[in-house]
Every structure is written in C-alpha cells, then in structure tokens.
Amino acid sequence: MKNTLLGGLTPQKFLRDYWQKKPLLIRQAVPGFAGLLDPKQLMALACGEDAQARLVTCQHGEFDLRHSPFVAKDFSGLSRKGQWSVLVQGVNHFLPEASELLKRFDFIPHARLDDLMVSYAPKGGGVGPHFDAYDVFLLQGYGHRRWQISTQADQTLIDGAPLRILKDFKVEQEWVLEPGDILYLPPHCAHNGIAEDDCMTYSIGFRTPWHQELAEQFLVYLQDRIDIPGTYADPDLKLQKHPSEIGPAMLRQVGDAIRKIRWDDEDIANFLGSYLSEPKPHIFFDGPARPLSATRFAEAVQTRGVALDLKTLMLCQERTVCVNGEAYKVRKNDYRVLRELADARMLPADAALTQDALELLYEWYLDGYLSPATRRR
C-alpha cells in the first residue's frame, strides 16, 4: 500500500531508493498540517525544567548559541538583536500529538528513532549551513522555510564558531517548503534553512550511533556480566634482569585470562535493547502519587487498556523486552502482547494479558513508565 507521507512511494521503494542515499522532497506529505503548537507555546516549553532547548542568534554574520534552562525574558527583544531561532528537542516527550505524529514514521524501526525537534524562527532566521550525521525528515509547520542543500564532499567547518557551520557551502538545489511539505535528508547532506516568514519546522531525527560508542558501551555492559575465575599466580617466577619490564610469562597468563571473555548474539541483542532504550540523562520518571493496588490496576487495564508514558522507550527482540534501559525475558505468549504494546505504545482493553504480564506492567506502572489508558479503547 502506498504511503501518502512519502508522496505516493511505498515504504519499500523509499527505503530502497532514498533512505541513507539521497534527498527527497515530498509536497503535501501531511495535507492540512499547520503544526502542533505556536511560537509562544514552544518558548514556554523551552523554559521548562525538563526541556533541552537552544537559542541561536546571529548578528552581522556572527552566530551565538545558548542552551536551556531559559526564562521568558530570554526571548524578549530578540528582534533587535538580528536573526534568531529557538529549537526544542524531544517535543514528543511533552505532547501526545507529537507522539502520534512520530507513529507516521513507523516504517523506520523504533531502535533508530531519536526524537521530534521543533524550531521557530522569524523571517530571515536560521542556524546556518551545516550537516548532520543522522537521517532527518523536515516537516514544515506554519509559515515557509527555504531549504538549500548540497551533497558536497567539503565539510570543513568555520573555526571557533559555536555551531558546526560549514565554511564553504555551495548550494546545489533549493526549495521553499509550505505547511505539510517534507524534505528528507540522508546523513552528511549539507543544508541551510532560512525562514521566509514566521515559521516552524518539525524535525524527525533518527540516531546513527558511532561504532566506537557502541563498542565502548558494550564493554561497560559486559563488565557486570562476565565471570573469569582465578587470580594471577606465578609460583615458577624466574629472576628478571630488568625488574621494570613486564615479562612474557605475565603477558601470556593475563592474555589467556582475558581471552576467556565470551559473548554471543543474545548478549549483543540484550545490550542493544538496553542501550538504545536507555533514556537520555535529563529524563526522569515519577511514579504515581497515589498508586493503585495491583488488583485495581489489573481491573483498570482490563477495562480501559494501558498506554506508555510519552518518555518511555520500549524495544523487543526474541522474547526479550527492553524498557528504559532494562531487559526482561518473558514467555512466548507474553512477548507477543508486549511487543504489540511496544509497536503501538498502547494496548486495548481486550489484550490477552497473563498474570505474569500484568505483574510486569504493574511494576512498570509503579516506576512511572506507563499507566492505564485515560479513556476506553
């Protein structure tokens, strides 16, 4: 079935021909889309304690960057200070409508999804020509933004700039996006967005972890899961001419011990699930102020269904369910139901939940990871 979000392309054709390969402009990908919030609401969100936000200003070609926390007065009088933009990460953690918007992109695995960033800029505002190391869909809210792109190989940055701004940006293509238009950009495609008028852009970003980062974090994951018995011993120690040298016998013994470290595909899968579902450092969960008893919780779930908290990350793999950095091995039938929860971020009231699954859901409820749905589903 064709996906209107992709301009008539099927997800399969989009993945084959464009994903991580080349840009794609999609006119009226989301017809009638005018955004989920207005500039004042976005700036109020940027002032929240849990927000990750940036304020970019530019005067006489010189950029300046400030990070949250902000207060309301930080956004007053900005029009007298040249061009400016405010950008707020993780809007899907605050707005149910934003979480619903991300579901339109379910043809990309959840393990790759980062978040929804929303930016506002008055006429002329932008953050300069730059490139990202990840895939992004740029969905235009209200207003109009001119996007200039380049697939240039030269990615030299301006020295000393607070932002990663390209030193020599050569425009190859450009378009003005209207509300509901989408521009998909693969990693390292240089781009420059300039507000044609007051406008807001919704950036759906997909993470691309560095191999170095994955390797380092996998070793951290292993350190609590390995068991190498024994201690170093050298009853046959020989006298060394140079006591400061590490002898070949020690090297062999320690090398043999380290080579006993083993892992398999299940270890890697559990690591990936835990690592990729780990919330960012600024994200915290609060359990219910007046928690239901386990019995009342089960009744509520069976009556109304259950929904994940907007901040919860949930991934699945081969009967292992990973929620906010923790892995849980479950039975086959429970896995199917919990995978449905991970896919849709909710379960209907008629879901076939076993007692074991209900107990696990109740544990997550007490942690603040989910709650009974607020209405019948």
Image (spheres, rainbow, N blue to C red):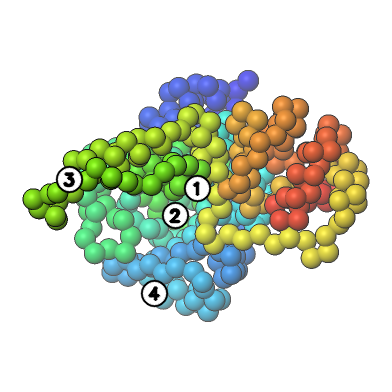
Element under label 3? loop
Residue density around tag 1, few if under 14, some if 14–19, many if 20 or more, within 10 Å? few
User: Residue 373: image x %, image y %?
Assistant: 81, 48
* Amino acid beneath label 3: Lys
Q: At 43% from the left edge and 23% from the top edge, which residue is drawn?
A: 17
* Amino acid beneath label 1: Asp
Element under label 1? loop
Query: Which of the pair 311/318 is nearer the observer?
Result: 318
Q: At 28% from the left edge and 45% from the top edge, which residue is drawn?
A: 235
Residue 144 in view, yes or no: yes
Element under label 4? helix
Q: At 41% from the left edge and 61% from the top edge, which residue is drawn?
A: 125
| Label drawn at residue 81 | 4
86 to 261, vertically: above or below: below
Residue position marked by numbered label 3 in the rendering: 238
Q: Earlier in the sequence, mark 2 or mark 3?
A: 2
How far apart are the alpha carbons under marks 1 and 2? 53 Å
Query: Which of the pair 184/198 is nearer the observer?
Result: 184
* Amino acid beneath label 4: Lys
Residue density around tag 3, few if under 14, some if 14–19, many if 20 or more, within 10 Å? few
Tags 4 and 2 in contact by the CB under 8 Å rule? no
Relative side of 203 to 49, left or right: left
174 to 51, vertically: above or below: above
How far apart are the alpha carbons under marks 4 and 2? 18 Å
User: Residue 344: image x %, image y %?
Assistant: 70, 37
Residue position marked by numbered label 2 in the rendering: 196
